[in-house]
Image (cartoon, rainbow, N blue to C red):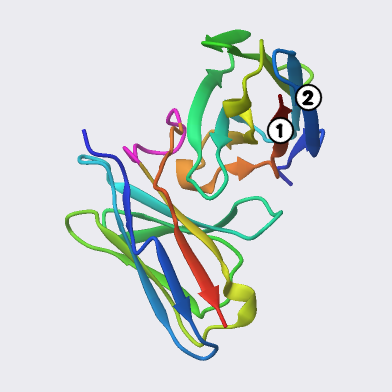
């Protein structure tokens, strides 16, 4: 069964600090992995999308890594800001699976405090 | 390019009523998928439509239904509302190539349904 597990479930950090969110998956055959940011009450917004051959991808202060061998991904946030407070969702797609039926993680809720 | 538009943004219904939510995808996108998100829960996949045909379906009761029109706009309907249907309903569009595409989903802002 395809699964995506994210950790930690929630995280509180001080403004300016760095943090790393984890995503482990068992989706097969792997096609791509995406990280989304969802502000409270809003729709998710894409941060990065990574395919099998990509190890690292950055989007400003967000850097995602992918280890396809261990089936793990991480999202590193550098110099956090109050606006980073949100839920971060890891989504994995398998080949032959349409985008809409991707496997979603339950998300990590990040709170950045001043 | 306009994003995904969902209407209405907020609505309140009572148990037993029905509700219809609308989603206009990004121009040129042919796939529309729907998700339910309850407090503290991850996104639960409802169904996906592509070229007016339901392509995938999640594990929701038959009270949840949808359709897609020739212009790719989509609607979802929930009949005989229950308290547990209170949630944020999200719609996402994608270009909709065959399986194995990049999988990029573009989400709308959602419709927040409250059932009293």
- Tell me which numbered mark, 1 or 2, is placed earlier along the sequence: 2
Q: Secondary structure at mark 2?
A: strand
Q: Is residue B82 left or right of residue B12?
A: right
Q: Residues within 10 Å of mark 1 (few under 14, many from 20)?
A: many
Q: Nearer the viewer, residue A22 or B39?
A: B39
- Which range of residues does the magenta coloring cover? B94-102
Q: Residue furthest bottom?
A: B16
The residue at which mark 1 appears reads as A110
Q: Nearer the viewer, residue B115 or A29?
A: B115
- The percent position of residue B92, horizontal first and vertical second, equals 41, 47
Q: Which mark is residue B96?
A: none
Q: Quadrant of residue B9?
A: bottom left
Q: Is residue B48 visible?
A: yes
The residue at which mark 2 appears reads as A13
Q: Is residue A108 left or right of residue A40?
A: right
Q: Quadrant of the N terminus of chain B?
A: top left
- The percent position of residue A6, horizontal first and vertical second, equals 76, 35
Q: Main secondary structure of the magenta part?
A: loop
Q: Residues within 10 Å of mark 2 (few under 14, many from 20)?
A: some
Q: Are marks 1 and 2 in contact (CB under 8 Å)?
A: yes
Residue at image location 52% in from the left, 10% down from the top: A60
């Amino acid at each position: 069964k395809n699964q995506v597990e994210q950790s930690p479930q929630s995280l509180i950090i001080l403004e300016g600090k760095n943090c790393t969110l984890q995503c482990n998956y068992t989706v097969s055959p792997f096609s791509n992995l995406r990280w989304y940011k969802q502000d409270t009450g809003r729709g998710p917004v894409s941060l990065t999308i990574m395919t099998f051959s990509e190890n690292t991808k950055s989007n400003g202060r967000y850097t995602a890594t992918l280890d396809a061998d261990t089936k793990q991904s991480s999202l590193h946030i550098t110099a956090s800001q109050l606006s980073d407070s949100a839920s971060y969702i890891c989504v994995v797609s398998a080949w032959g699976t349409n985008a809409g039926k991707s496997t979603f993680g339950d998300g990590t809720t990040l709170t950045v405090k001043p | 390019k306009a994003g995904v538009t969902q209407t209405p943004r907020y609505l309140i219904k009572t148990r037993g009523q029905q509700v219809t939510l609308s989603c206009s995808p990004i121009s040129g996108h042919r796939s529309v998928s729907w998700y339910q998100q309850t407090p503290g829960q991850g996104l639960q996949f409802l169904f996906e439509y592509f070229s007016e045909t339901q392509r995938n379906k999640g594990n929701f009761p038959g009270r949840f239904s949808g359709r897609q029109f020739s212009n790719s706009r989509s609607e979802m309907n929930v009949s005989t509302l229950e308290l547990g249907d209170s949630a944020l309903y999200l719609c996402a569009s994608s270009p909709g190539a065959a399986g194995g595409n990049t999988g990029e989903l573009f989400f709308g802002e959602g419709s927040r349904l409250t059932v009293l």
